Amino acid sequence: MILKSTFVVGGAASGKSAYAESLVLNSGKPRVYLASMQAHDTEMQDKIAAHREMRGAGWRTVECPLDAVAALAEISHDEIVLFDCATMWLSNHLLAGSDLGAESRGLLAALDACRGQVVVVSNEVGMGIVPENALARRFRNEQGRLNQRLAAQSDCVVTVIAGLPLALKGALP
Amino acid sequence: MILKSTFVVGGAASGKSAYAESLVLNSGKPRVYLASMQAHDTEMQDKIAAHREMRGAGWRTVECPLDAVAALAEISHDEIVLFDCATMWLSNHLLAGSDLGAESRGLLAALDACRGQVVVVSNEVGMGIVPENALARRFRNEQGRLNQRLAAQSDCVVTVIAGLPLALKGALP
Amino acid sequence: MILKSTFVVGGAASGKSAYAESLVLNSGKPRVYLASMQAHDTEMQDKIAAHREMRGAGWRTVECPLDAVAALAEISHDEIVLFDCATMWLSNHLLAGSDLGAESRGLLAALDACRGQVVVVSNEVGMGIVPENALARRFRNEQGRLNQRLAAQSDCVVTVIAGLPLALKGALP
């Protein structure tokens, strides 16, 4: 069984996306992929291609580098949606000069109101040395706060370390 | 029940301070806040103000950017003290040119000898890429060692991820 | 009891090496230390000396900054080997211009084929802010993938935080 909302948080290349995809596939429901990553350069293009190959066919993909709210409003009650990931989405908004607090509140409300099941992936970014760059410090604070709120409103929260899931809230789906 | 000593470790903006404050509030004891952060600039001033607003009234606050030992010696047996945080304290000593090994040993002894209950907050800083800056490398090694020792001498150790506590030693308070 | 293969992952200065060494010592078997670190400068020399002092005498040490495969092939069935660590080994290969994918596959196969028991230590490096340096980004992706594969093929996986072990797969040895 998959709960209404699952939040998957982990480091870079921790296997969090693969784990989240397995949850969605196991649900057996029509699946929607909300893609936040933009192909600005070849490194990003390669990453997007690798993610697409990993998750395979059978997904309806909606590009939402900024407007995840509109995409979430279109999800129907029989669908399951994978939002991958909140970190790239937040980073896009930071670079776009958005009001991050307002955007985060909007995302949380849209996830809460979503008619389908939701699995949200996000990065843990706060366990290194304090960045020298002020924008990076601001980003890690905003990301940390968003992760706390995503976790607070999710039925199940899982952290993934070296590909292995560890339940932080609720039982492993 | 709160044990004699609890150590709370987590990333930046992980919710570790809010969790630690909830432990202290739930104890029902007179509470003392040992504040290690200094307002060097507006970013720090904002952070201090946000922390102060979060924890609310009813705390006796002692500023101890460097001398936590003296502050801990003044805690009475009926009080509970929140030391927030060991990372800023260690960073202040690094910048002051202190002998970090000696200062860390002094802090550990003072915590052990404290007559009241203690909750110590600290940052995990070693899960990113090796910093290019030699001082940052030294700091993360010293911080890691200090965290190990704080954990070793605490009755209860909790890590906080996305606002959610996970017990590493003892049961969640 | 120590299982055939244990993978220990944690941040810098988290106590992961000390924990891994305790597993090896508790096995009571002849122990082999596969050392991947090279003494390029005094910082590294100091670190190597500290590690050597910590683990004490009674180890057969094999230097393998690059060729861990050959070293693993020489382990006998009654021995237990500590490979410390996969991160330094991967970093050495990155700097040597090796094909990291091929080297990683070779290492995984050699660990799987090793006649003795194996304990592998590695760093979590993906929980900080995205590095600005492209090589660092590549390294953290390769390290994350290698950690996932090491975890997948190990009987037991443990993360160490502030010196405290947390089982991610299997029971704590």
Image: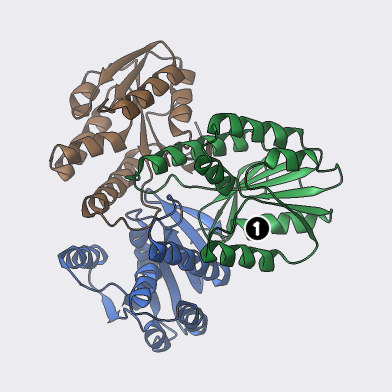
Chain colours: A blue, B green, C brown
Q: Determine the residue positioned at 86% across, 42% down.
A: B77
**Kind of residue at badge 1:** Tyr
| Residue B133 x %, y % | 35, 44
The answer to whether B69 appears left or right of C76 in the picture is: right
**Number of numbered discs on residues:** 1
Left or right side of C145 for C94: left
The answer to which image quadrant residue C110 occupies is: top left
Vertical comparison of C149 with B17: above or below: above
Report whether residue A1 is seen.
no
**Residue C145 in view:** yes
Residue B45 falls in image quadrant: bottom right
**Relative image position of residue C105 (x, y in whole percent):** 19, 40
Residue at image mark 1: B19
Q: In this view, does A34 lie above or below A77?
A: above
Q: Nearer the viewer, residue B89 or A140?
A: B89
Decide which of A99, C87 is in the foreground and name it.
A99
For label 1, the crowd category at 10 Å Cα-Cα, with few meaning under 14, some 14 to 19 and many 20 or more, is some
Tell me what residue is drawn at x 77 percent, y 66 percent: B57
